[in-house]
Each structure stands twice: as structure tokens, then as C-alpha cells.
């Protein structure tokens, strides 16, 4: 039976690499960074942040932030992973918005 429903493709789980079943966007969809131009001037650039993909087993833990995840903003990565662990490019995943203005 061929249904007309097409599931949104999910990437691998950011924690265990299993096929993702859920994905969600970070609380802020853009990351603002300061980039230093060739002439030494600084400019603010906004980069889109990839959605977080998780498997069923990790969805609740990641979504509720019981399992902290970090982000690697290197252009070659731009992906989420377990906070503090090394990303594929070698740079550890870091907290994007540490100690946000208290809510
Ligand atoms: Zn998982
Ligand atoms: Zn990386």
C-alpha cells in the first residue's frame, strides 16, 4: 500500500547515531558570531543552526536537557553532539548559549 504520507527525513541521532525518529530546532534558530574580516574589522554574522535529530530512546532526555548536547559551529560540521565530546572535525561540542539571561 503506497500512502501519500512522506515522513520528514531525519538524520542520525546526535547522541548514539541510530536512525533518528524525532527532530527539533534549538530555541534560537540562528547563531550570531563575530567574524573578523581581512581588514581587521569585525562583523556580526548569523548562521542557521541545524536541527537536532534524536532517536526515540534519546528524545525525552535530550529534549528535557537531562542529556546535555553541544554544537560545533565549524563550517565543515555544523552539527549537534554530546556536550564536551569531540566532533568529527576535532573541536568539542560546546554549549551554544551558556547561562542565558536568567529566566
Ligand atoms: Zn539515540
Ligand atoms: Zn566539528
Image (cartoon, rainbow, N blue to C red):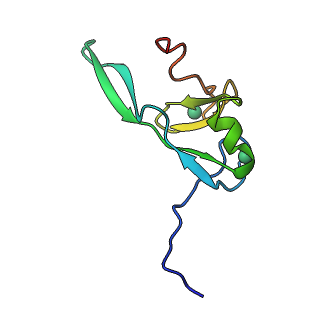
Q: Residue at x 71, y 37 (%)?
A: 61
Work out whether 34 lies above or below 85. above
**Residue 85, horizontal then vertical, whole percent:** 70, 28
Residue 98, image quadrant: top right
| Residue at 68% across, 23% down | 84
On screen, residue 98 above or below 73: above
43 vs 86: above or below: above
Going by the image, does 29 lie left or right of 12?
left
Does 76 sit left or right of 55 as displayed? left
Residue 42, visible in the rendered structure: yes
- The reply, left or right, for residue 54 in relation to residue 30 is right
Name the image quarter holding residue 40.
top left
Which residue appears farthest toward the bottom when viewing the image? Answer: 1
Give the image location of residue 59, x and y in percent: 67, 44
x, y percent for residue 76 = 50, 39
Q: Quadrant of residue 49?
A: top left
**In-image side of 34 versus 19 (left or right):** left
Total numbered badges shown on the rendered structure: 0
* Residue 88 in sight in this render: no
* Quadrant position of the N terminus in the picture: bottom right
Residue 99 at what x, y percent from top left? 54, 13
Amino acid at each position: 500500500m503506497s500512502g501519500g504520507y512522506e515522513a520528514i527525513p531525519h538524520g542520525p541521532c546526535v547522541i548514539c547515531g541510530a536512525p533518528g525518529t524525532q527532530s527539533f530546532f534549538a530555541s534560537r534558530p540562528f547563531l550570531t558570531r563575530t567574524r573578523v574580516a581581512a581588514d581587521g574589522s569585525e562583523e556580526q554574522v548569523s548562521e542557521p543552526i541545524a536541527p537536532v535529530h534524536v532517536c526515540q530512546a534519546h528524545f525525552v532526555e535530550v529534549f528535557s536537557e537531562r542529556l546535555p548536547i553541544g554544537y560545533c559551529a565549524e563550517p565543515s560540521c555544523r552539527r549537534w553532539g554530546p556536550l564536551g565530546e569531540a566532533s568529527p572535525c576535532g573541536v568539542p561540542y560546546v554549549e551554544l548559549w551558556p547561562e542565558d539571561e536568567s529566566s
